[in-house]
Image (cartoon, grey):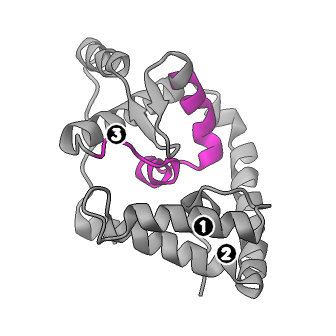
Amino acid sequence: MPDTNVDYYEILQVSQSADPETIHRVYRFLAQRFHPDNAETGNEGRFREIHQAYTVISDAEQRARYDITYQQHRKERWRLVSAGAQSENDFELEQSMRLMMLEALYTKRRLEPDEPAIFTGDLESLLGRAREQLQFTIWFLQQKKYLTRDDNSRLLITADGVEFLEQNYRAKGLRRLQARTESSSA
């Protein structure tokens, strides 16, 4: 059963209109890269996500069912974004969101220097914001060169981003993000 809370298209890094050949080609590339037997880039959790996404998206019947719920989910997210437009224009909230995003990327880089990047979908979950609500923040931080994207479209903090974050935490005395425990994420 497809999980409608997961964006299989983003996991496979293909558009919703991708043809079966493209989906298969991208899957083979990603599966080979993240297969647990790959000593350099293997990642069992990521491999399972890729395989699940491919299983759903490559089967015409499952893909059709998934696409229906996927579109409904996207419409619902846009409805929430447009309904909250008034409160989302708060400059302080946006500044806070920028710092929280940079902090998440900073922490990832410090804790996992060999895998310092984060997928946009993971940031959505971590920050509790829909992708549509993060797009402006990501755009701004990229324009300022505080973050960048890697070859897999994952987000990474830059050296300028680290300096900006450190200066703003010192200057504003902001409180740090609290780590989620296993029991609170369940």
Residue 6 in view of the camera:
no
Is label 2 in contact with label 3 (beta carbons under 8 Å)?
A: no
Identity, as a three-letter code, of the amino acid under mark 1: Tyr
Specify start and end residues of the magenta stretch as a single range.
115-141
Residue at mark 1 to residue at mark 3: CA–CA distance: 23 Å
Q: In this view, does 78 lie to the left or right of 44?
A: right
Q: In this view, does 71 lie to the left or right of 111?
A: right
Residues 29 and 78: in front is: 29
Report the magenta stretch's main SS. helix
The tag on residue 57 is 2
- Residue at (41%, 60%) from the top-left corner? 33
The answer to whether residue 52 is above or below residue 96 is: below
Q: Residues within 10 Å of mark 3 (few under 14, many from 20)?
A: some
Residues 91 and 63: in front is: 63
Picture coordinates of residue 50, whole percent (x, y): 50, 69
Q: Mark 1 points at which residue?
A: 8
Quick one: label 1 or label 2, which is nearer the N terminus?
1
Q: In which quarter of the image is the N terminus?
A: bottom right
The answer to whether residue 124 is above or below residue 55 is: above
Picture coordinates of residue 142, whole percent (x, y): 53, 24
Identity, as a three-letter code, of the amino acid under mark 2: Ile
Is label 1 in contact with label 3 (beta carbons under 8 Å)?
A: no
Identity, as a three-letter code, of the amino acid under mark 3: Ala
Quick one: label 2 or label 3, which is nearer the N terminus?
2
- Residue at (19%, 43%) from the top-left corner? 111
Residues 77 and 91: in front is: 77
* Count of marks overlaid on the render: 3
Is label 1 in contact with label 2 (beta carbons under 8 Å)?
A: yes
The tag on residue 104 is 3
